Image (spheres, rainbow, N blue to C red):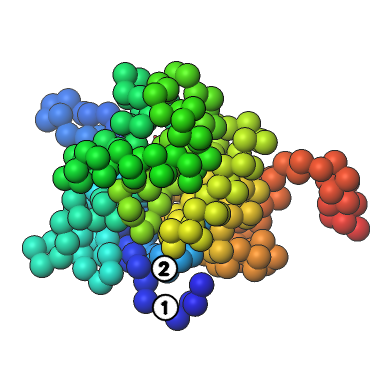
């Protein structure tokens, strides 16, 4: 986590405003949602960068902009010093193979008619990896994400639990041999115990495959647990960013303080201690 290392990803002044409603005539947008409103940040190789903020603050839009699923109004994304989509930069397609995304909805991301083995092998095959090699990669990844291949090979998404489906989605992302995983609320739909297992799996995979994570969640406890550094978003802007523990210890912005204080604590003894400390 050397803070001096050259950024893997650099985001410069990224902006996306969505039109809301039209005025007639001349049918021009009458208002805009400033979903992402001029944000700049770096992602260092090997770190886990957490992104927190209330629902609607622009986290998912930022993620989509990052991998060019949607086009920004302005701003740029730079990978290894090369601007994505620029004539002298790197192609969106090349970038996508290096930056893979895992979403919250584990079911929607999978084709219900395709068995797990093929689902994981699909991306590499579409990318020109020979079928046999892609299937081998799929089976290897199944065991790496904790799904015993002999049991899960031929199963379909509806035959899996939410946690198992999310493991498949992680394997699908890893099958593209990325350097960065962009995880957007990837564990948010899971039960607490399953969530903990998937978080541990993510930590193991990160070490094994030398990955960099951008971990987006509205759940501050989870972000604190997994992140080296955290970025706080508010209304399309980055309010502050800092290493995880300093951010919790000394939030610079009053909004961050409020956000952190709203954390529901799982352990009632901690909750009582916190209230006692606060009332002193
Ligand atoms: N495709 C879209 N069209 C119009 N508004 C959108 C679109 N996507 C997101 N928004 C709006 O942009 C804001 C940020 O949304 P989003 O990035 O999904 O936030 P988050 O992921 O933090 O919950 C919200 O107000 C949302 O309604
Ligand atoms: Mg979101």
Within 10 angstroms of label 2, few (less than 14), some, or many (20 or more) residues? many
The Cα atoms of the two marked residues, 2 and 1, are separated by 7 Å
Residue at left offset 26%, top offset 44%: 133
Residue at left offset 22%, top offset 29%: 22
Q: Tell me how many marks there are.
A: 2
Q: How far across and down, in percent of the image, does residue 112 sit?
A: 35, 20
Q: Nearer the viewer, residue 28 or 95?
A: 95
Picture layout, residue 56 above or below residue 250: above
Q: Nearer the viewer, residue 20 or 89?
A: 89
Assign a secondary structure to mark 1.
Answer: loop
Indicate the quadrant where residue 132 lies.
top left
Picture layout, residue 135 above or below residue 47: above
In this picture, residue 124 sits left or right of residue 235: left
Assign a secondary structure to mark 2.
Answer: loop
Q: Could you tell me which quadrant the C terminus lies in?
A: bottom right
Q: Nearer the viewer, residue 153 or 79?
A: 153
In this picture, residue 72 sits left or right of residue 89: right
Within 10 angstroms of label 1, few (less than 14), some, or many (20 or more) residues? few
Residue at left offset 55%, top offset 47%: 201
Residue at left offset 65%, top offset 48%: 221
Can you identify the residue that label 1 sits on? 5
Mark 2 near ligand 1 (CB under 8 Å)?
no
Residue contact at pointers 2 and 1, CB within 8 angstroms: yes
Picture layout, residue 97 above or below residue 108: below
Q: Which residue extends farthest left?
A: 87
User: Does residue 65 appear anywhere in the picture?
Assistant: no
Can you identify the residue that label 2 sits on? 45
Q: How far across and down, in percent of the image, does residue 248 sit?
A: 67, 61
In this picture, residue 47 sits left or right of residue 18: right
In this picture, residue 99 sits left or right of residue 56: left
Q: How far across and down, in percent of the image, does residue 204 sit?
A: 55, 54
Q: How far across and down, in percent of the image, does residue 41 sit?
A: 39, 65
């Amino acid at each position: 986590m050397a803070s001096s290392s050259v950024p893997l990803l650099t985001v410069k002044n990224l902006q996306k405003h969505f039109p809301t409603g039209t005025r007639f005539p001349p049918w021009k947008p009458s208002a805009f949602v400033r979903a992402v409103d001029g944000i700049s940040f770096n992602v260092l190789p090997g770190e886990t960068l957490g992104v927190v903020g209330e629902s609607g603050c622009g986290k998912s839009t930022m993620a989509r902009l990052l991998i060019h699923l949607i086009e920004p109004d302005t701003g740029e994304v730079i990978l290894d010093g090369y601007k994505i989509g620029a004539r002298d930069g790197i192609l969106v397609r090349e970038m996508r193979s290096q930056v893979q995304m895992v979403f919250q909805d584990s079911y929607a991301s999978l084709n219900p008619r395709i068995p797990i083995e093929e689902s994981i092998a699909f991306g590499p095959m579409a990318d020109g990896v020979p079928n046999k090699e892609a299937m081998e990669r799929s089976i290897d990844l199944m065991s790496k994400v904790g799904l015993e291949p002999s049991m899960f090979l031929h199963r379909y998404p509806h035959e899996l639990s939410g946690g198992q489906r999310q493991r498949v989605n992680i394997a699908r992302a890893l099958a593209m041999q990325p350097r960065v995983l962009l995880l957007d609320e990837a564990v948010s739909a899971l039960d607490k115990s399953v969530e903990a297992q998937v978080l541990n799996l993510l930590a193991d995979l990160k070490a094994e495959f030398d990955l960099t994570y951008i971990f987006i969640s509205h759940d501050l406890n989870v972000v604190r647990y997994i992140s080296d550094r955290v970025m706080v978003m508010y209304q399309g802007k980055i309010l502050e960013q800092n290493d995880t523990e300093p951010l919790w210890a000394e939030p610079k912005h009053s909004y961050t303080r409020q956000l952190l204080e709203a954390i529901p604590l799982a352990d009632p003894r901690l909750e009582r201690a916190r209230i006692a400390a606060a009332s002193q």
